Image: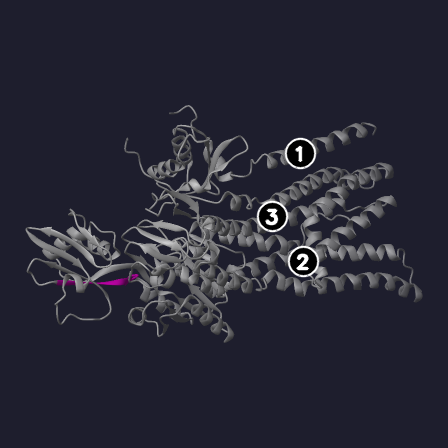
Amino acid sequence: MDIMIVLIPIAVLMGLVGLFAFFWSLRSGQYDDLEGAKHRILIDEDEG
Amino acid sequence: MALAASGCPSGLAAPAPEIPRADPAAFVRRDAEGRDALELLVQGARCAGCISKIERGLLDLPGVIEARLNLSTGRLRVAWRAGALAPARISQKLHDLGYAAQPFDPDAANAQADHEGKFLLRCLAVAGFAAMNIMMFSVPIWAGHGEMGEATRTLLHWVSAFIAVPAAMYAAQPFFRSAWQALRARRANMDVPISLAVVLTLGVSISETWRQGAHAYFDGVTMLLFFLLIGRYLDHRLRERARTAARDLLALQAVSAARIGADGAIDAVPAQALQPGDLIQIAPGERAPVDGVVIEGESELDRAMLTGETAPQSVRVGMRIHAGVINLSQRLVMRAEARAGESSVAELARLIEMGEQRRARFVRIIDKAAALYVPVVHTMAALTFLGWLAGPALLQAFGYDVAEAGVRIAILNAAAVLIITCPCALGLAAPAVQVVATGRLFQRGVLVKSGDALERLAEIDTVVFDKTGTLTLGQPRLVDGPSGETLQQAALMARASRHPLSRALAHAAGPGPAIAVRELPGVGLEAERDGAPMRLGKRSFAAPDAAGAPADGAAELWFAHGDAPPVRFAFEDAMRADVGPVIAALKQRGLAVELVSGDRLVAVQSAARAAGIETWRSDISPAGKVAHLEALRAAGKKPLMIGDGLNDAPALAAAHASVAPGAALEASQAAADLVIQVRCLRLWLKRLMLRKPRGGACGKICSFRRSIILSPRRLPQPGF
């Protein structure tokens, strides 16, 4: 069961990476305009 | 310029109507990068087409560096090279594109950042992270029950504890704070049992882990927090949306005024910056920003929003005018006599605030439940504890063999009672139902401003209507007068004027040509045609010697052409077509219906008769309306106020529940519980009243909640 000493930190670390990725996205304002985000994908940048 | 479609290219929103536009120059701020920046609230933007149309259109303007539209809030941020552009060109451009845009005070906007919501989201993320990672360690423990060695199990428990304790301490902060506040005020709310359950379970689990016991409940604690935080966040979102709407309206009150400087130059300043003694120009179509005295010009004022009175009032030099009135025909210059915060509009705002404070005392159904629930739950937990402490000892005293007993088992079982009865169903279900209900209503054009509005709406027993703009259309309509050639001739003149009665006449005559007229403010119009003078206006002006004409107090225009006898056009604020059936339907449901208006007795009387309302009052001031609603409440009634004018806003706030139509003035929308975007009175009342017989949304919440509370808990608690 020695492998657990390696696997447990890796598992928790991966969870933490996800958590901090969420914090970063929250801080950088990516949830400020959910309504606009879903429409912006339809705008063709090259046009006009 | 190529003729592009005006407004939303998908046709989801109508092009913006003509509104009084203010020069945004007063609200431009220099940002951190040395650019000029302006925040605008854009109305009518709905889709991807709108975003690209607005952003590209503005970027085409010379000097504009950044244009970003937030579609959720309708806020547009524009930044340009300092001094490269006149701010008025931005609002002009938006207007050309077909969108209404109003500047708002960036200081008010900055105060709107939703810190509480972001904190709840972070708590939710932490609780979710902890719940999932602890489950990763809990599943092996359950799966390997009986096979896993004690050391491995304890190791996994310790790892769980190291995740759960800091995570719970962080994520449970919203509950701890609220519980602490309630306890300090010697009350009990839902967060008291929640906090107690979290702390107790963590404590029991740590002590079990220390003892190398078989069961720890870290997974349960974090999962409980995760679910409760979902409910808390939904609830917050709902209230935040209502608050944002209200604050946007407040920020929009930041109207600018055209101040005339000492050198005669006119510059745009925020209304808040006006000082008594300042000279202000009011162009036709603009609102007076503060109270003051007319010192130049002669015109007519629309006071309908302030007093409910439909007939325009003429003003001359030396007359006092109140903030909020709209100048109708000619340029006026006024001298300010009060600051924006001391004007008559601010007085209304104070009345509104008083009403809202009173309403805040309404006890939400969920808090009523908590007041009953919390003592019961805590008594049960205490009884469990005492029972397990005393029971085994008693049994042993009678000679029975009891394997396990003692304080540890008693605490464990008391904690089990607390966790199982933890009101997470209440915390999750009530906001979930409110979010669904308000979401559905929103799709049908009803904006619910506060979560408890639906609960209050279900309790009403009296409906109080305003007249102008609610029962009536708020605009004069031609009801009596000649038709055919005479009407067309009068319309030639009427089309050239901005006066409401002229507009109504032009509307009745249909589209057609206009001729050049001379407008005599407060009197009428004059023109020449076929060599004979034409006059349209007051009786004293157009028909000084007309006899035998009815004097019924209705708004009227007289028209005279040459030597022909003058003719009379009578106007009335027309009733909405569906008022009668709506009033009848309300009465059928056993609701008392009243009409309270600031308009003249004759107008109110005829409106009440036409609508079939027996109880009515006329010439009521805004404070009088509030007093009337107070009297109703004192008599034990629960009135619903329906109104749209600024003069109704205090009454809307004072009523038990209130509704404002979508066309209402911003202040009224901010004061009302519900804003209804549908034009037709019957449609919107039907939508609301449909809920009544079933006990309203509140009844729905109750049954939904009952079913959740009564169903067994679904969170895995294998230890219990």
Residue B318 appears in the picture as rendered: yes
| Amino acid, disc 2 | Met
Main SS category, magenta section: strand
Relative height, residue B4 to residue B279 (above, below): above
Measure the alpha-carbon separation of dots 1 and 3: 20 Å
| Amino acid, disc 1 | Phe
Magenta segment: does it hold B571?
A: yes
Q: Which residue is mark 1?
A: A20
Q: Are marks 1 and 3 in contact (CB under 8 Å)?
A: no
Secondary structure under the numbered disc 3 in the rendered image: helix
Q: Which residue is mark 2?
A: B190
Residue stretch in magenta: B567-577
Measure the alpha-carbon separation of dots 3 and 2: 15 Å
Q: Which residue is mark 3?
A: B233
The answer to whether dots 1 and 2 both sit on one chain is: no
Q: Nearer the viewer, residue B338 or B370?
A: B338
Measure the alpha-carbon separation of dots 1 and 2: 31 Å
Give the left or right position of residue B524, taking residue B307 as reference. left
Position of residue B432 measured from the top left corner of the image (x, y, whole percent): 57, 52
Magenta segment: does it hold B309?
A: no
Position of residue B440 measured from the top left corner of the image (x, y, whole percent): 47, 51
The answer to whether dots 1 and 3 both sit on one chain is: no
- Which quarter of the figure has residue B129? top right
The residue positioned 63% from the left and 35% from the top of the image is A22
